[in-house]
Amino acid sequence: MTTTKKTIGRFKVRKAGNSMVITVPKSLAIREGEMFVLNVDDSATQLVYEKADQTNPWENGQFKTFNFRQNMQEVGNYGQGHDVGKEQVTW
């Protein structure tokens, strides 16, 4: 399987705080907050950014439309239940 390269443009590195930044064109439809992995070859002449696997449901949008309040009404809030067993022991 061969992959083809597509040149998007030339971008100048700039300094932002203690980091160096390369801008990404808005036309690539990359959302703010997306995670990428940077790979570099041994000579540090080829940098390749690849989208990182988004396994964290708080970051990948899995819970974006989930209604937590409605779910709590349906199943209850178990953190607010009554104590059972030794939790009621007076010291």
Image (tube, grey):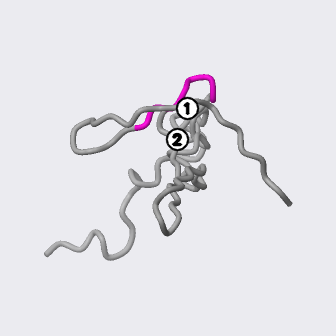
In the image, which residues are magenta? 22-28
Residue 48: x, y in percent?
Answer: 56, 52
Residue 27: x, y in percent?
Answer: 62, 23
Q: CA distance from mark 2 to mark 1?
A: 6 Å
Residue at 22 percent across and 38 percent down: it is 17
Residue at 58 percent across and 40 percent down: it is 61
Q: Residue furthest right?
A: 1
Residue type pointed to by label 2: Glu
Q: Residue furthest left?
A: 91
Q: Residues within 10 Å of mark 2 (few under 14, many from 20)?
A: few
Magenta span includes 24: yes
Quadrant containing the C terminus in the rendered view: bottom left
Residue 25: x, y in percent?
Answer: 55, 26
Residue placed most toward the observer, 69 or 74? 69
To which residue does mark 2 refer?
34
To which residue does mark 1 refer?
31
- Residue 53's place in the image compared with 72, above or below, is below
Quadrant containing the N terminus in the rendered view: bottom right
On residue 43, which mark appears? none
Residue placed most toward the observer, 70 or 21? 21
